[in-house]
Image (spheres, coloured by chain):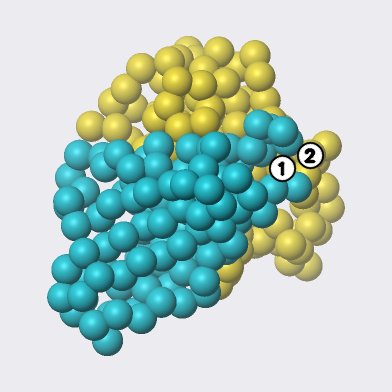
């Protein structure tokens, strides 16, 4: 069955960096676009970034553009999110999710369980 | 940027029908996806491409999309349907995923 398991979250000081990982299993990773999303405590869902199935296209939310980088390693079936210059408003549970469509406009049909990132001094 | 508007809350008695709306400029021209999220859990896709249901999602959940409003309809509401519901689209003009603010469904 499809499994996505985020890791790498934790407590980090403002201005520092963190890298999240999301190893995928149970499907052909190289055939699907993948997304990162987040949810601040008590708030709604916010999209962070998407990477195409082959890594050739990447799009970012305005709130993270220039600070976060999405990437994927097909040989390891793993999705990454490099987060630099972290701010307190980046505090959230971060989810990786598979895009079920052809491209990146389908629904998110599988989600990980999430990893908590807390940015605090 | 494109905005999706949902009512913050909807209340319904068990056995009745709940309708959750998602408003957006000509949203009928976009594909809308709906998610259910229960406390402490990751969201679950319940409707995709306006009205399709993933396997395992009960037929009680249905979706429609026309004009400026998409609607999630939950028939024969059960206590277990109490959750937050989010609509979502891809905005091709900005190359961004857009979520509605979410609707808390309360079963009375």
Residue at left offset 79%, top offset 57% = A87
Q: Secondary structure at mark 1?
A: loop
Could you tell whether A120 is left or right of B18 in the image? right
Q: Name the spot of residue A8 as percent of width and height, x first.
A: 56, 45
Q: Which chain is yellow?
A: A
Residue at (53%, 48%) from the top-left corner? B67
Residue B61 is situated, as x and y percent measured from the top left of the image, at 25, 55
- Near mark 2 (Cα within 10 A), the count class, few <14, some 14-19 or many ≥20, is few
Q: Is residue B59 above or below residue B96?
A: below
Q: Please tell me in which quadrant of the rendered image residue A117 appears.
A: bottom right
Position of residue B20 measured from the top left corner of the image (x, y, whole percent): 41, 65
The residue closer to the viewer here, A40 or A46, is: A46
Q: Which mark is residue B76?
A: none
* Residue in the foreground of this view, choosing between B98 and A58: B98
- Can residue A111 be seen here? The reply is no
Badges 2 and 1: C-beta atoms under 8 Å apart? Answer: yes
Q: Tell me what residue is drawn at x 21 percent, y 75 percent.
A: B16
Above or below for A92 versus B14: above
Q: Which chain contains the residue that carries disc 2?
A: A
Q: Quadrant of residue A10?
A: bottom right
> Is residue A23 positioned above or below B53 on the image?
above
What subunit carries mark 1?
A: A
Q: Quadrant of the C terminus of chain B?
A: bottom left
Q: Which chain is cyan?
A: B
Does residue B42 appear left or right of residue B1 in this picture?
A: left
Kindly report the distance in space between the C-alpha atoms of the residues bearing marks 2 and 1.
Answer: 6 Å
Give x and y (percent) for residue B11.
Answer: 36, 81
Q: Where is mark 2, residue-wise?
A: A65
Query: Is residue B52 in view?
Result: yes
Tell me the residue that label 1 is attached to.
A61
């Amino acid at each position: 069955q499809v499994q996505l398991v985020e890791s790498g979250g934790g407590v980090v000081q403002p201005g520092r960096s963190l890298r999240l990982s999301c190893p995928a299993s149970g499907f052909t990773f190289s055939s699907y676009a993948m997304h990162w999303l987040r949810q601040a405590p008590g708030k709604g869902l916010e999209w962070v970034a998407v990477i195409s199935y082959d890594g050739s296209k990447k799009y970012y939310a305005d709130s993270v553009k220039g600070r976060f980088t999405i990437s994927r390693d097909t040989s390891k079936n793993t999705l990454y999110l490099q987060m630099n210059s972290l701010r307190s408003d980046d505090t959230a549970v971060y989810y990786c999710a598979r895009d079920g469509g052809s491209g990146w406009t389908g629904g998110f049909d599988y989600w990980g369980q999430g990893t908590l990132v807390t940015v605090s001094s | 940027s494109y905005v999706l508007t949902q009512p913050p809350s909807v209340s319904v008695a068990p056995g009745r029908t709940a309708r959750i709306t998602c408003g957006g400029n000509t949203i009928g021209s976009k594909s809308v996806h709906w998610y259910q999220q229960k406390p402490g859990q990751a969201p679950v896709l319940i409707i995709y491409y306006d009205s399709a249901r993933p396997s395992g999602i009960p037929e009680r959940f249905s979706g429609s999309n026309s004009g400026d409003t998409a609607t999630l309809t939950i028939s024969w509401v059960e206590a277990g349907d109490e959750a937050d519901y989010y609509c979502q689209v891809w905005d091709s003009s900005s190359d961004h995923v857009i979520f509605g603010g979410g609707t808390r469904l309360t079963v009375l």
